[in-house]
Image (cartoon, rainbow, N blue to C red):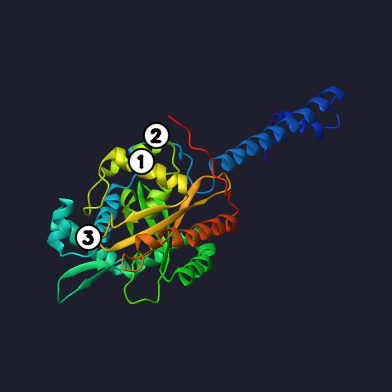
Amino acid sequence: MSDVQWPIHFFENIFQKSLELKNRYLSVCYIFHIVKNDFMTEAVHMENDVKRGRGRPKAWDDKASQNTIKSLDRALEVLVQLGEMQGGTLSEIAGALDQSPATVYRVLTTFQGRGFADFDEQSQVWNIGAAAFLTGSQFLRRTSLVERARPIMRDLMEATGETANLGIERDGQVLFLGQVETHATIRAFFPPGTASAMHASGIGKALLCRMDDKRQREVLAASKLERFTPHTLTDPEDMIADLNAAKARGYAIDGEERNLGMRCIAAPVYNVFGEAVAGISVSGPTTRITTGRIAELAEPVMDAARNLTKAIGGNDRPVVSTQT
């Protein structure tokens, strides 16, 4: 063993009996200073973790392009295109995306392995797989809207004898979330996940008429008021007049504006702030939903909208749209 006397570290001074009281006091203060610094540093780290959120890395607020996985983004473009086409051959999908068939094929086979895409050997057509539906349907479980709407839609269908629908606005279109079909042979069909132009939809117009002027005109401009039938309103002033009328009476009408021979009556559903967040409607053939029955059928539709508003804790006295 070496007889070398190593210098005593400052915080070890407290253990030396021969040390003056003043130096012992300084050693104790030094120890507590170190502990305090360690504690405060850890507290800051914990606070930053809380602020950052559990679902994001440290650089979550970084908007740099490197945070996007480009290959995954391109693959999802294939899946979205496949859904919009409602099926297609490899060459059709690749042509629509302006990508090479070899690249698209690798993406599709990867999706097929996970059940997100299906391939029909006989027709050589690719389609959306069951896994895509199961994953997408999780969206419906994020909110109680669909769950609360189901019995109300069923009652509405029984009261009117027509198909009841539920939809919301998503990216300037109507996204249908649910439907209770009528027992009649001829009926409208909008499966969950179907998107439709707002200006040619009963639910779309019920939501549009409750938007502020700025948002309303943005949605209409983006849609370019595309014509689907001879009854589609394609003139902006005609559309605004129709929306004002819908707002005044409390319900909107799609009179063969999207599909010939079909009519829809819709009313808005409001959240706790009095904002229109969804629409509920009945739709059916014009032979049953005649112009003479519109006012009659509008009453149960508006009742259903009020009941759903209350069911989700909404305010059935809507906010007044602001002029911009």
Q: Are marks 2 and 3 in contact (CB under 8 Å)?
A: no
Quadrant housing the N terminus: top right
Identify residue type, mark 2.
Answer: Lys
Label whose residue precedes the other's in the sequence (1 or 2):
2
Mark 3, secondary structure of its residue: helix
Decide which of 150, 302 is in the foreground and name it: 302
Identify residue type, mark 3.
Answer: Met
Identify residue type, mark 1.
Answer: Ala
Point out which mark residue 241 bears: 1
Residue at 14% of width from left, 60% of height from top? 92
Q: Residues within 10 Å of mark 2 (few under 14, many from 20)?
A: few
Q: Residues within 10 Å of mark 1 (few under 14, many from 20)?
A: few
Quarter occupied by residue 120:
bottom left
Q: For residue 193, say whether it is visible.
A: no
Residue lying furthest front:
292
Decide which of 259, 54 is in the foreground and name it: 259
Question: In the rendered image, which residue does mark 3 sit on?
Answer: 85
